[in-house]
Image: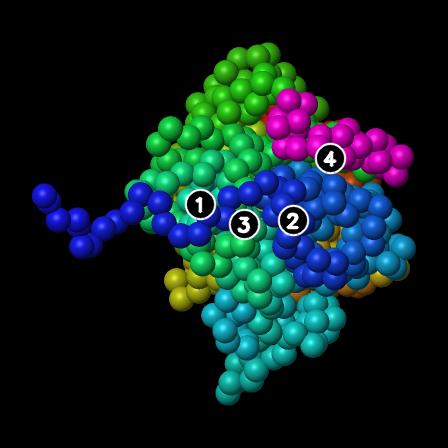
Amino acid sequence: MPKSDPFPIPLDEGKNKVCSLRDAIKRNIRPGMSIHLCSTHTRSNALIYELVRQYHGKRPGFTIITAGLIANGVILLHEGLVRRVIASFIGDSYPSPGPNPVVQRAYLSGKVAFENWSILTLPLRLMAGAMGVPFMPTKSIVGSTMEKDNHDSFFVLKNGGETTGMVRALHPDISLVHGVMADRNGNTVITPPYGIDIYGAMASREGAIVSVEKVVSTEEIRKYAHLVRIPGHIVRAVCPVPMGAHPSGLNGQGIHGFNSYCDDYDFVEDVRAASIEPGRMDSWIKRWVLGPRIHEDYLRLLGPQRILYLKGKADPDSWKAELLEGPLEGNDPLKASPGERMAVMGARSLCKRIVQNGYKTLLAGIGVSNLSAWLAYYDLISRGFDIELMAEIGFYGYAPRPSDPFIFNFRNIPTCKMLTGTETIMGILMGGEFNQCIGAIGAGQIDQYGNINSTLIPEKQYLTGSGGANDICSSAKEVLVTAIQTKGRFLRKVPYVTSTGKRVKTLVSDLGLFEKISGSDTFILKGYFPFAKEEEALREIKERCGWPLKVVRRPERLRLPTQDELQKLKLFDPKGQFFES
């Protein structure tokens, strides 16, 4: 009789923590808790919906900690479940960043406190919490309004002639996470890009509630040990919920037998439209959140065709079929929209600065600035210059695919040379020892020194928050900004400094090109678009500028976009989402 193996490796290990969404929330969430919503390239939306179902009509006073409270996440504010938000971005992110009406109502009510951080400093706080250290150093925040507002959790350390910011460790009570798969004990596979990663789960006092596409054996988990980001011993509950990230997508690259699915843009736009009026938001929540009693009801409401479409769209080559759906029109340079002029001039300026200064990486934010970066990328590589595109969520060395202008779209993932997280992109590759990076970002408001406000107009309007803007302006070698020019945007002094302007060297508007010339700390108008004769064009540019504008002696008459440049923009943005005239 054979002896039993004295060193067994069981097929399944650990306590069985598998349960329903309802039980996971009911057993582990209490009023007053600080809840971390994990933000990798995906989000725990099924868990958020269940949270709303169980606390609808109540005032639990949650603190929400997340990289970005976006899309359907704003229902937590609308339902009155939140007393405080700690985030880097709060608003609409698709197709371009902008204020959200639900957020605006919460801000003006004074019932919700908004604590603003950058996309890098927030995970650094959570990383410190996870590591059990009190502080973590950073180059970000210094000199911004966030430094003053967050003085309880941020200070500047002076080391000789240098200054370094220090962020205080952050410990949520519990974390909500969505992954690809887990075993019954909670060992969880998370696929890259990692965004602000799982530090919040590691830092949480009571661990994490995990939802996954499927529960598998521990033996299966071992095959993907290199992708396991959350160990079972910190997990409180495991909930199997297919499509549990929707309307966020999920990247299953490298997982045998798993189909990725893309972000549901139509769904996100429906939420955005509903958020305009409280009654419409109530109706939307009733249909999509309170109506479905369980997740299977939600999937039936989505319907099989929509689910299949989102999975099909995740195919790396699906953009080819989309471009065949209809002819691309509107490539007449004389009819270029103001936004198209701005994007093209931004690209030309980026190319010039990259070649002149030998930059090796280009990091862009969401919006027109990323299309400028995409145009510049293809122009430079066609001329034999080496440049690597990066995106804050964890993309390195990607080649943007046509038909979808959203910077984080899933079809860009397979083109990446490296998939990583925010702390690597923003903290090391952009701002670290081998920093050779130029940044391209947008701005809600900008002043003559290049200081940017994308956070709020005190007591009037909440904009969106920093996202990665502060980190880029704090660490990149230099920064280019694109912004539609109005007196309300081009100010003598911004009312809130999201990002300081020290590294902002170039400003491109829909009217002209501004630069800091010969060491100047303020912008000088260097060129204008020929939308009118020179005298008239310069007069309009000055009228739309909130500071006494200086102009070079002989301002350049900027070339209009070429047909080729406009055609590329149409390929990237065939619906014209960024370029409405």
Q: Nearer the viewer, residue 568 or 66?
A: 66
- Tell me the number on the disc at residue 25: 2
Report, in whole angstroms, how far the alpha carbon at label 3 lies from the one at label 2.
Answer: 9 Å
Q: Earlier in the sequence, mark 4 or mark 2?
A: 2
* Magenta-colored segment: predominant secondary structure: helix
- Mark 1 lies on a secondary structure that is loop
Report, in whole angstroms, how far the alpha carbon at label 1 lies from the one at label 2.
Answer: 17 Å
Type of amino acid at the residue the image marks with label 2: Ile
Q: Which residue is mark 3?
A: 237
Residue 183 falls in image quadrant: top left
Report, in whole angstroms, how far the alpha carbon at label 4 lies from the one at label 3.
Answer: 21 Å
Could you tell me if the residues under marks 1 and 4 are in contact, i.e. CB atoms within 8 Å? no
Residue 303 falls in image quadrant: top right
Q: Which residue is mark 4?
A: 289
Type of amino acid at the residue the image marks with label 3: Ala
Q: Is residue 496 magenta?
A: no
